[in-house]
Image: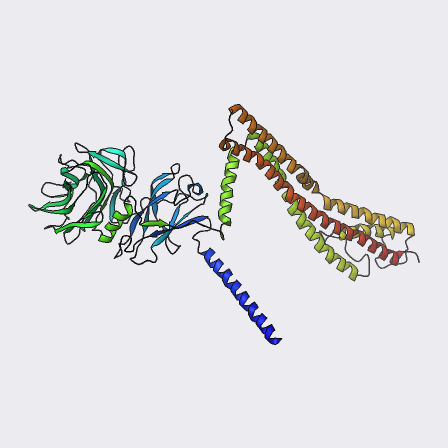
């Protein structure tokens, strides 16, 4: 028997421990959610393994392109312009800077750039979180802060008119532009150069100082071999740095101190397709050319780039000629030599059909979505308020006035009855401890809210008049039975007055209970009638048009119930309290009458 009992106890302990472990695991999982106001999230995984980009070193802070579409994001759960989208580090704590290149909710396509502090070559930790689903969130794009301090110019070419803009904090403007915008490119839109006169000019600025190195990268598509076309150039009288395409090969040429040095790619650029081209020059004057993230040429320059000044040009020479015939997208300029890993990462990540980023299944915030739900309901309430008509507002304001009055009555009456009950108990204790009926004072000292004391004081005054205002302890005077009956009637009169005082203002609650829901129903019927009348005049039924009107009409019924339901519960609570206090008063009347009869009644 004892063995069975011990076995049962051990089993119960094990079961309890398992339940506690599951509960703690659930709490731990819920607390891992970055912010409780966001309802949904997805994990974005970066493939840095040998099967992906084969990352062998840390590229440092990188800006990664994310292509969002209906396959990896439910746009119906995101705000109209993507204001509630957030990106969080793998630790689920640090908010990452980002900005949209484009956001098209109708087409369910978005291009977003996200700054990721670091990536490793291992399989762990190479992911971030994407949160969304908070209708109350404000836009948090950090356009100028997405890039690091060494990124001195970035042109997405997403504009359809005007001039291209720099997306870095340096805001290096374009002073001269001729070319075609709005061209579908590898990343959204790009710019086209006609090979005759099109060119982009970027004025000299302190940020465009290449004394510590230089990196230029872009996507390019040529339709035919080029005749020494300049992709990038910085030219002065006796110094120049040129990145160009001769026939189908990329080169980098430096002219300085009367010498000209050139590094050429050993790989041709196929015509008619997009390719990533990057050139870096480090402080040791080593120049490297990359095509699609792979090194295709390198060499040493006899001079560094410290004395290079003047304007930058894209697509041609500042001195005329050397115009590029082709398309360009995503131009980036840095004032340092970017590591190989960073250049390769950009080429793989930004290319069409890239599998570098993958998205896990959507997760919903089940444990901490209460505040987010409140925020969502707040958005619904704003919509209802926006479409409420004038007659609806008239009813709603009336209901709000009744609501305010009923709550004032509820609060004041609840406090009053609490004080009455408390002081009644204290008074009864004092009354029963004193053998002399007339000993308690007539002033309100100590019992200002006691209903029993008010009845007692009414009876004391009547009794003193009947005794001829004799001394308190004189008992020679006796009361006739008719006088006792009259005395009791006096007490009952005082009880009735106290009962009236207790029931004062309860009429407001009965009005709220009976009138609130009916006023709300009136507003709903009126609003629905107007909505259907408007639909009949328009000659069509569109749920997008009807829904706001129906919602605003139903809001009056909701508000009417909000007025009536608390008033109903509060009224029943107060009536129960008043009934108990009234019963105590009638019992006290009997008790006091009996005590007077025993003391002054005829024997």
Which residue is more in the foreground, 169 or 245? 245
Residue 17: percent from left, percent from top = 52, 66
Q: Residue furthest bottom?
A: 2
Total number of numbered discs in the rendering:
0
**Left of 8 or right of it: where is 509?**
right
Which residue is more in the foreground, 118 or 507? 118
**Left of 169 or right of it: where is 594?**
right
Which residue is more in the foreground, 525 or 571? 525
Q: Quadrant of the C terminus?
A: bottom right
- The residue that appears at 39% across and 47% down in the rendered structure is 86
Residue 305: percent from left, percent from top = 15, 48
Residue 426: name its quadrant: bottom right
- The residue that appears at 40% across and 39% down in the rendered structure is 81
Residue 447: name its quadrant: bottom right
- The residue that appears at 16% across and 53% down in the rendered structure is 283
Residue 137 shows in this picture: yes
Q: Quadrant of the N terminus?
A: bottom right
Residue 445 shows in this picture: no
Residue 469: percent from left, percent from top = 85, 53
Residue 581: percent from left, percent from top = 75, 51
Q: Residue furthest right?
A: 603
């Amino acid at each position: 028997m004892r063995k069975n009992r011990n076995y049962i106890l051990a089993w119960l302990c094990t079961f309890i421990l398992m339940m506690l472990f599951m509960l703690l695991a659930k709490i731990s999982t819920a607390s891992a959610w970055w912010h409780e106001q966001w309802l949904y999230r997805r994990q974005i995984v970066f493939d840095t393994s040998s099967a992906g980009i084969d990352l062998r070193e840390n590229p440092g802070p990188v800006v990664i392109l994310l292509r969002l579409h209906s396959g990896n994001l439910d746009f119906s759960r995101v705000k109209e312009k993507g204001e509630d989208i957030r990106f969080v580090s793998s630790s689920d704590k640090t908010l990452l800077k980002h900005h949209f290149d484009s956001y098209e909710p109708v087409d369910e396509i978005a291009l977003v750039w996200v700054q990721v502090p670091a990536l490793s070559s291992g399989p762990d930790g190479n992911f971030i979180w994407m949160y969304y689903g908070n209708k109350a969130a404000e836009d948090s794009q950090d356009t100028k802060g997405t890039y690091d301090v060494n990124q001195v110019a970035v042109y997405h070419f997403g504009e359809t008119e005007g001039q291209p803009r720099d997306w870095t904090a340096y805001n290096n403007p374009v002073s001269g532009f001729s070319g075609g915008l709005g061209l579908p490119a590898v990343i959204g839109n790009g710019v086209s150069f006609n090979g005759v006169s099109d060119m982009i000019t970027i004025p000299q600025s302190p940020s465009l100082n290449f004394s510590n190195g230089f990196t230029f990268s872009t996507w390019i598509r040529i339709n035919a071999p080029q005749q020494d076309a300049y992709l990038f150039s910085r030219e002065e009288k006796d110094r120049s740095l040129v990145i160009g395409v001769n026939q189908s090969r990329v080169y980098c040429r430096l002219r300085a101190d009367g010498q000209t040095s050139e590094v050429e790619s050993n790989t041709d650029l196929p015509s008619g397709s997009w390719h990533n081209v990057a050139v870096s020059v480090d402080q040791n004057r080593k120049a490297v050319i990359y095509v699609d993230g792979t090194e295709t040429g390198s060499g040493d320059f006899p001079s560094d780039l410290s004395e290079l000044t003047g304007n930058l040009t894209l697509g041609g020479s500042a001195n005329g000629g050397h115009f590029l015939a082709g398309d360009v997208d995503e131009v980036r300029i840095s004032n340092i030599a970017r590591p190989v890993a960073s250049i390769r990462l950009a080429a793989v990540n930004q290319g069409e059909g890239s599998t570098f980023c993958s998205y896990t299944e959507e997760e919903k915030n089940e444990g901490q979505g209460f505040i987010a739900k409140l925020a969502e309901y707040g958005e619904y309430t704003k919509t209802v308020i926006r479409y409420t008509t004038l007659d609806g507002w008239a009813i709603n304001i009336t209901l709000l006035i009744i609501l305010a009055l009923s709550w004032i009555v509820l609060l004041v009456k609840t406090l009053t009855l609490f004080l009455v009950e408390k002081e009644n108990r204290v008074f009864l204790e004092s009354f029963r401890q004193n053998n002399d009926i007339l000993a308690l004072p007539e002033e309100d000292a100590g019992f200002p809210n006691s209903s029993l004391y008010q009845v007692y004081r009414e009876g004391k005054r009547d009794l003193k008049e009947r005794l001829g205002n004799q001394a308190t302890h004189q008992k020679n005077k006796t009361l006739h039975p008719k006088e006792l009956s009259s005395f009791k009637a006096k007490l009952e009169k005082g009880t009735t007055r106290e009962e009236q005082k207790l029931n004062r203002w309860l009429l407001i609650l009965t009005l709220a209970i009976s009138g609130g829901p009916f006023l709300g129903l009136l507003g709903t019927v009126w609003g629905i009638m107007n909505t259907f009348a408007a639909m009949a005049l328009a000659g069509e039924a569109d749920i997008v048009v009807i829904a706001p009107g129906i919602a605003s009409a139903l809001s009056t019924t909701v508000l009417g119930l909000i007025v009536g339901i608390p008033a109903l519960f509060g009224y029943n609570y107060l009536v129960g309290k008043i009934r108990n206090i009234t019963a105590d008063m009638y019992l006290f009347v009997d008790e006091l009458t009996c005590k007077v009869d025993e003391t002054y009644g005829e024997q």
